[in-house]
Image (tube, grey):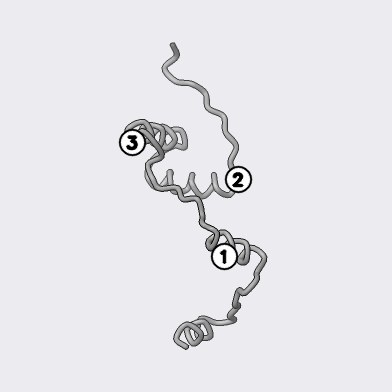
């Protein structure tokens, strides 16, 4: 049996770039980071963090935000702070 296996996966380019920058700062290659993730999944016997299925309220809020419904826009931080404090 080989010591390692080839893994092929598809991810968004921006996601990979951002993750690779973090891995680099940690002194890791992408392969090492994926291996750490896999080992953690095995140790936890599941995904090592909570994954939630959004409830109906959250789903509606996500949909509204994506469609920019009820989203306030501010030109300055000062305007935002005034709105938050009112």
Q: Quadrant of residue 75?
A: bottom right
Give the structural element (helix, strand or loop) at label 3: helix
Point out the tag, 1 or 2, that comes first from the N-terminus: 2
* Residue in front for this viewpoint, 76 or 69: 69
Point out the tag, 3 or 2, that comes first from the N-terminus: 2
Outermost residue toward the left? 43
Residue that mark 1 sits on: 61
Q: Quadrant of residue 32?
A: top left
Outermost residue toward the front? 56
Point out the tag, 1 or 3, that comes first from the N-terminus: 3
Q: Residues within 10 Å of mark 2 (few under 14, many from 20)?
A: few
> Looking at the image, is 38 positioned above or below residue 83?
above
Residue that mark 2 sits on: 13
Q: CA distance from mark 1 to mark 3?
A: 32 Å
Q: Position of residue 33 (x, y in %)?
A: 42, 37
Residue that mark 3 sits on: 44
Give the structural element (helix, strand or loop) at label 1: helix
Q: Nearer the viewer, mark 3 or mark 2?
A: 3
């Amino acid at each position: 049996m080989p010591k390692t296996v080839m893994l092929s996966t598809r991810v968004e380019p921006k996601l990979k770039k951002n993750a690779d920058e973090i891995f680099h700062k940690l002194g890791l290659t992408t392969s090492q980071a994926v291996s750490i993730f896999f080992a953690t999944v095995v140790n936890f016997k599941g995904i090592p963090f909570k994954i939630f299925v959004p409830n109906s309220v959250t789903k509606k809020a996500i949909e509204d935000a994506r469609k920019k419904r009820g989203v306030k826009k501010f030109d300055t931080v000062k305007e935002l702070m005034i709105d938050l404090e009112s």
